[in-house]
């Protein structure tokens, strides 16, 4: 039976939207999962001259198939340089110290507020949490020195006015918020990519707004699943993906369905 590449999923749309946020020539900090699928897609189609790096110290990665972790041989066998982790951190900070504006990074979390502050530490009180997560990893340093794209599942319990803990700072409490925290004001979150669309931040207010929504969603759907007031007046309908792009994700980038499951035809 011929394979169907028209039946794309929201996760595939999310990976494609990630890919389109990457500009040609950028240095891209990625982890595993959807960001790496999106970055691999960008390197193949949208931004062939981007350079992928991971916090384990691997630089200029070009994996043939999506790795399962940042230390996977699929990454190590296809990279330009293998640095120790401490050099990655130094490289990240040095980019900011030299005012180089060529990096973009992908982070995730459990909660996010209207200004892009992210919680990946705990739900509830820090000292007596309902749930404790693995924490920052490299995300806090990344959010300090790099412009970020935040990956989230779009649910009302995750998009809330006040998060339980700030693991990775966004725009703080609005304009000048990062500077008040002692963080670089010329870095910060530029977008949030979810399973319903893409949100960006207003240049003046630094508050999140809906920039685009998937064909499977709508502004009303996004509002219903957001726990704070959200401007949807600028939102546009995003194009459905081409069959060639979906085929590339399924047949070349993630053929083992490690991170994106292919819909089963009935």
Image (cartoon, grey):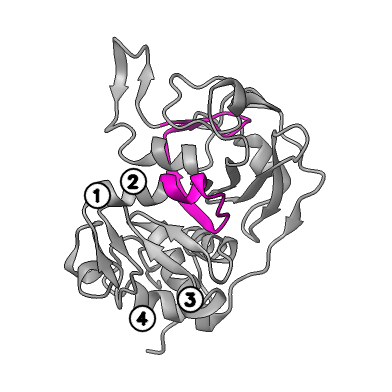
Residue 103, given in percent of the width and then of the height, sits at 51, 56
Inter-mark Cα distance, 1 to 4: 32 Å
Q: Is residue 128 left or right of residue 47?
A: left
> In terms of depth relative to the viewer, which is nearer, 220 or 174?
174
The image quarter containing residue 204 is top right
Mark 1 / mark 4, whichever is N-terminal: 1
Q: Nearer the viewer, mark 3 or mark 1?
A: 1
The answer to whether the residues at label 2 and label 1 have Cβ atoms under 8 Å apart is yes
Mark 2 / mark 4, whichever is N-terminal: 2
Task: Using the image, tell me which numbered label, if any, was put on residue 2.
Answer: none
Q: Is label 3 in a helix, a strand or a loop? A: helix
Mark 3 / mark 1, whichever is N-terminal: 1
Please tell me how crowded label 1 is: few (under 14), some (14-19), or many (20+) other residues with Cα within 10 Å. Answer: some
Residue at 36% across, 61% down: 53
Task: Using the image, tell me which numbered label, if any, was put on residue 246.
Answer: 3
Residue that extends furthest to the right in the rendered view of this protein = 233
Task: Using the image, tell me which numbered label, if any, was put on residue 89.
Answer: 2
**Is any atom of residue 146 visible in this view?**
no
Inter-mark Cα distance, 3 to 1: 34 Å
Q: Nearer the viewer, mark 2 or mark 4?
A: 2
Q: Which residue is mark 1?
A: 85
Residue 162, given in percent of the width and then of the height, sits at 55, 19
* 6 w.r.t. 146: above or below: below
Inter-mark Cα distance, 3 to 2: 34 Å
Please tell me how crowded label 3 is: few (under 14), some (14-19), or many (20+) other residues with Cα within 10 Å. Answer: many
Q: Which residues are magenta?
A: 93-119
Please tell me how crowded label 4 is: few (under 14), some (14-19), or many (20+) other residues with Cα within 10 Å. Answer: few
């Amino acid at each position: 039976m011929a394979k169907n590449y028209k039946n794309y999923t929201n996760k595939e749309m999310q990976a494609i939207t990630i890919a389109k946020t990457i500009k040609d020539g950028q240095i891209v900090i990625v982890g595993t999962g959807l960001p790496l699928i999106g970055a691999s897609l960008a390197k193949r189609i949208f931004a062939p001259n981007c350079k992928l790096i991971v916090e384990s110290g691997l630089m200029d990665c070009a994996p043939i198939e999506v790795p399962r972790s940042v230390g996977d041989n699929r990454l190590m066998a296809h990279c330009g340089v293998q640095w120790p982790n401490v050099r990655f951190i130094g490289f990240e900070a040095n980019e900011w110290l030299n005012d180089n504006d060529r990096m973009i990074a992908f982070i995730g979390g459990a909660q996010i507020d209207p200004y892009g502050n992210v919680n990946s530490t705990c739900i509830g009180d820090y000292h007596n949490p309902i749930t404790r997560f693995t924490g920052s990893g490299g995300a806090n340093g990344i959010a300090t020195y790099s412009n970020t794209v935040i990956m989230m599942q779009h649910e009302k319990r995750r998009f809330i006015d006040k998060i339980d803990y700030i693991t990775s700072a966004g725009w703080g409490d609005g304009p000048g918020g990062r500077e008040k925290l002692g963080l670089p004001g010329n870095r910060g979150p530029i977008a949030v990519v979810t399973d319903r669309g893409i949100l960006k931040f207003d240049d003046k207010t630094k508050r999140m707004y809906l920039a685009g929504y998937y064909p499977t969603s709508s502004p009303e759907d996004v509002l219903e699943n957001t726990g704070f007031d959200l401007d949807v007046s600028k939102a546009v309908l995003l194009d459905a993906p081409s069959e060639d792009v979906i085929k590339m994700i399924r047949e070349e980038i993630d053929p083992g369905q490690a991170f994106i499951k292919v819909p089963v035809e009935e």
